Every structure is written in C-alpha cells, then in structure tokens.
Amino acid sequence: MFILAKAGESAPVTPAVPAAVSVVTSEKKLQKMDFWIRNPDHFAYALIEAYIENGDADLLASAKAIVDSEEPEIRRDAMLKYFYGAYEPLDTALAPLFSYGLACMRRNPETKQRMYFLLPKGLDVTKRLETELPEAQWYSERAMLIGTFSQGKSGDQLAKWQYRHPTYAGARNGETIACIAEEVRERIVKLEAACE
C-alpha cells in the first residue's frame, strides 16, 4: 500500500477507475520497487550508481544513510531470482487491499499491462497508519525515496538498474538474491575518500 501511495504516479482520470489517487503502471515496475523496499542494500547500490552517473551528492548521502543504519539487515526480506529478475507473486499481498477497497487492478486497454491503483480509502488508511504506527514511517519514507528514483522509468528500466550488480545478475533461477550490504558500505567509504 505504501508503494502505491508514495511511489505511484498521479492517476489519470479514467472511466475504469474514476476516483483513483495514484497508479503504478505495470506489474513489473511494482515488482522492482517491492524488491528495493525489501532489499535496502540493493537500492543503496542503485543510488550509488546514479550518483556516479550524475554527481548528485544527495544520492550518495541517501545510500550512506541506508547502509550506515542496520536497515539492510533488519529490513531485509529476501527474494528469489527467476528468469527475469526478483519475483514473488503479488496476489497474497494485494488481496487484502483489493478486498477492503483500498486499491484495485485494471489492465491497460492498449498494452494489456496490469495497472495498480490506490483508491481514496487506501490513501486514508495510509495516512492513518503513518500517524498511529511509528513503524509505518519507515515504509512511507522508503517508498517515497524509491518513487522519486523510479519516476519516469519503466519496469524494464528499473530491471536494468537491478541487473547492474553482479550478485543480482548472477543469481540462478530459483536462488535467493544475496545481501550486498558490506560491499556497498566499502564502496561508499572509497567514494567518500576519493572526494576528500
């Protein structure tokens, strides 16, 4: 729900879902963002790669904040690698959101891709969780950062970012994608030393 609320794009006005608040435009994009929520070390690596490409110091600072905490170890929820990258069926996670009227899925009539919409009731619940549950704040903030990074990128483009790391790319079909937190920490130390 936080991915839809904080990382989704503004929903277009559509007869299929007239009241939608936000949308994630494909299952692949939702899967890639879910992987980064569940594997903060891999997201930190993507932030470093983006920093190297465009020199935005905020990206490096965000990566450092992620790995300087125990977040990669505490928040990690490992995922398996399948033929096209990290994958886990979304049905179980999305079923409560759909059944309680917090979100819905519709197919894009042109591309046939699944589109995931957050509904007004889902936005209300998200805001309430942020207010009432301190634990929810992390999910809100992380989903927002991932949404900013992912803005304007397709699911295929996000997959390419994830495949940049050899551990991710080299994982075999059905194998758990390994943690890379220590490697990311070491890389940040080297980048910071080079900047001094």
Image (cartoon, rainbow, N blue to C red):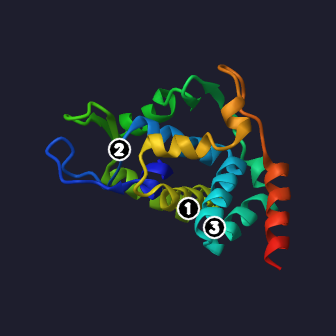
Asked if residue 85 lies left or right of residue 187, the reply is: left
Element on which disc 2 rests: loop
The residue lying toward the viewer, choosing from 190 and 72, is 190
Element on which disc 3 rests: helix
Whether tag 3 and tag 2 are in contact, CB under 8 A, the answer is: no
Residue reaching furthest top?
174
Question: In x, y percent, where is residue 152?
Answer: 40, 56
Is residue 86 in sight in this rendering?
Answer: yes
Q: Which residue is mark 2?
A: 25
Residue drawn at (66%, 34%) of the image: 169
Q: Earlier in the sequence, mark 3 or mark 2?
A: 2
The residue lying toward the viewer, choosing from 179 and 97, is 179
In the figure, 162 relative to 137: above or below?
above
Whether tag 2 and tag 1 are in contact, CB under 8 A, the answer is: no
The quarter of the displayed image where residue 78 is located: top right
Residue reaching furthest left?
15
The residue lying toward the viewer, choosing from 123 and 25, is 25
Residue drawn at (64%, 59%) of the image: 47
Foreground disc of the pair 3, 2: 3
Disc 3 to disc 2, C-alpha distance: 25 Å
Residue drawn at (79%, 76%) of the image: 195
Q: Which residue is mark 1?
A: 145
Q: Earlier in the sequence, mark 1 or mark 3?
A: 3
Asked if residue 140 lies left or right of residue 42, the reply is: left
Three-letter code, disc 1? Leu
Three-letter code, disc 2? Thr
Whether tag 1 and tag 3 are in contact, CB under 8 A, the answer is: no
The residue lying toward the viewer, choosing from 98 and 77, is 77
Disc 2 to disc 1, C-alpha distance: 18 Å
Q: Which residue is mark 3?
A: 59
